[in-house]
Amino acid sequence: MKIYNTLTRQKDEFKPLEEGKVSMYVCGPTVYDYIHIGNARPMIVFDTVRRYFEYKGYDVNFVSNFTDVDDKIIKKAIEGGIDASVVSEKFIEEAKKDMTALNVREATKHPKATEEIDGMIEMISTLIEKGHAYEKNGTVYFKTRSFEGYGKLSKKNIDDLEAGHRDIKVAGADEKEDPLDFVLWKPKKEGEISWSSPWGEGRPGWHIECSVMSKKYLGDQIDIHAGGEDLIFPHHENEIAQSEAANGVEFARYWMHNGFLNIDNQKMSKSKGNFFTVREIGEKYPLQVIRFFMLSSHYRGPINFSEELVMAAKTGLDRILTAVSNLEYLYDNAKLENITDEEKATLEEFVEFSNRFDTAMEDDFNTADAISIVFEMVRVANAKVTSDNSKEFIESVKGTIDVLCDVLGIETKVEKEILAEDIERLIEERQAARKEKNFARADEIRNELLEKGIILEDTREGVKWKRA
């Protein structure tokens, strides 16, 4: 398996630190609002990476944080006259709902920055002791030039950064020993959330949060660190500097970054009116379609979100789901049980499809090629599978498609909508059960219909029903 490593700028052979295990940290959202469609891309991409590792038998420890202390969260809390924790907790829950709707699996651990303050204070203290950080009037800065490898991820030369130091400039810059130094701990401002520390009341800088959460839940050294390419500098560069200066070992072996998402060929921005939350997009398109759309391009390249491209993705996904539904129908109507020799020969094609799928995914998780292979499987299934085939053969064909779609996080099981005549038949059966005073059966039927999204209403004119 080869992974494009941002650190080396090439595809490197993946060799885990521990045989059969993968430790993976993905930077999560800052929870001051509903997550937007740009946030969704790394969530989907790295969930798929995780799924593939698990499909290949790896035990994956997947950690993705929630940044729940930040200037934007504090600003929203002050504007609403509420505690910052109320803002962050609300949007953590909303983010989890959106992630579920996108079929993103829950992380092994979703740490919150506010619950890891002690670890941050400890790491900052270590950095000061080792001469990599210093305190000025309650603010603690990382001494950037003290870390010899600074710039190795972003390929920025530290001597060239002086002119562009605004990228990492923060409040209190005049107190810095060097314009390139960045904040590890900042003093409390009026009305802000804060914690006690050896340097006074305050709160951590953004970069130190991820270093500490990764260390606590994955260890000093991890296999994969991932996120959007906008995080390469300064966030991930600063994480490397802090973690390696404090821990004395290489922080992450492989760095993965997904490309930007544009809206109609323009950068997403509220000022341009092309800023969309996942919740808003979900009102217009099934989020399963959005996941399929995101995976139809290679994760490292930019992706353009437009109605035309999303509808094309919907058409493609429908083709797969229709084929699976057809295979279910054929299975139910097949006469033969056991597989024939001729069918075994056809199944060899599907074994080859699976092998090619693996080859695509092991070449830096090329989901675009993997999806094209699923389409090939669908074409062969539509052409060669009929109700004259055996149940065993049809089940094997469908099972192969199901498994590979599951690796991509695409759900192939579609709940069939209950027909009106079936609803009326069950209502009649329920009425008969009530006349016979078989109330247990009557309640059972009501609950069965409710599970299928059908709500019954008993009125003077009889039983009325509606879809939920």
Image (spheres, helix red, strand yellow):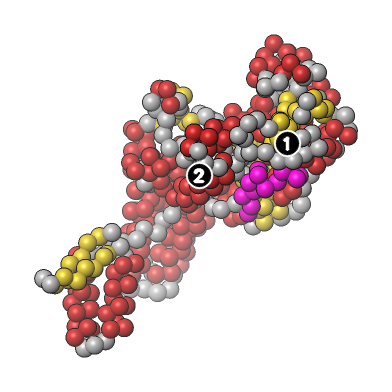
Q: Residue 299: give x, y in percent of width and height.
A: 54, 36
Q: Residue 333: give x, y in percent of width and height.
A: 31, 69
Asked if labels 1 and 2 touch by Cβ distance under 8 angstroms, the answer is no
Asked if residue 188 shows in the view, the reply is yes
For this view, does 161 lie left or right of residue 66? right
| Kind of residue sitting beneath label 1 | Glu
Question: Quadrant of the rendered structure where residue 432 is?
Answer: bottom left
Residue at the farthest top position: 163
Residue identifier under label 2:
91
The crowding category of the residue bearing disc 1, from other C-alpha atoms within 10 Å (few below 14, some 14 to 19, many at least 20), is: some
Q: Secondary structure at mark 1?
A: loop
Residue 132 tag number:
none
Question: Quadrant of the rendered structure where residue 429 is?
Answer: bottom left
Q: CA distance from mark 2 to mark 1?
A: 26 Å
Is residue 110 found inside the magenta-colored segment of the image? yes
Residue 201 tag number:
1
Front in this rendered view, residue 28 or 202:
202
For this view, does 40 lie left or right of residue 336? right
Q: Residue 300: give x, y in percent of width and height.
A: 56, 32
Front in this rendered view, residue 137 or 169:
137
Is residue 181 found inside the magenta-colored segment of the image? no
| Residue drawn at x 37%, y 34% as measured from the top left | 309
The segment highlighted magenta reads 108-120
The crowding category of the residue bearing disc 2, from other C-alpha atoms within 10 Å (few below 14, some 14 to 19, many at least 20), is: many
Question: In the picture shown, does residue 98 fall above or below 234?
Answer: below
Q: Residue 89: give x, y in percent of width and height.
A: 54, 47
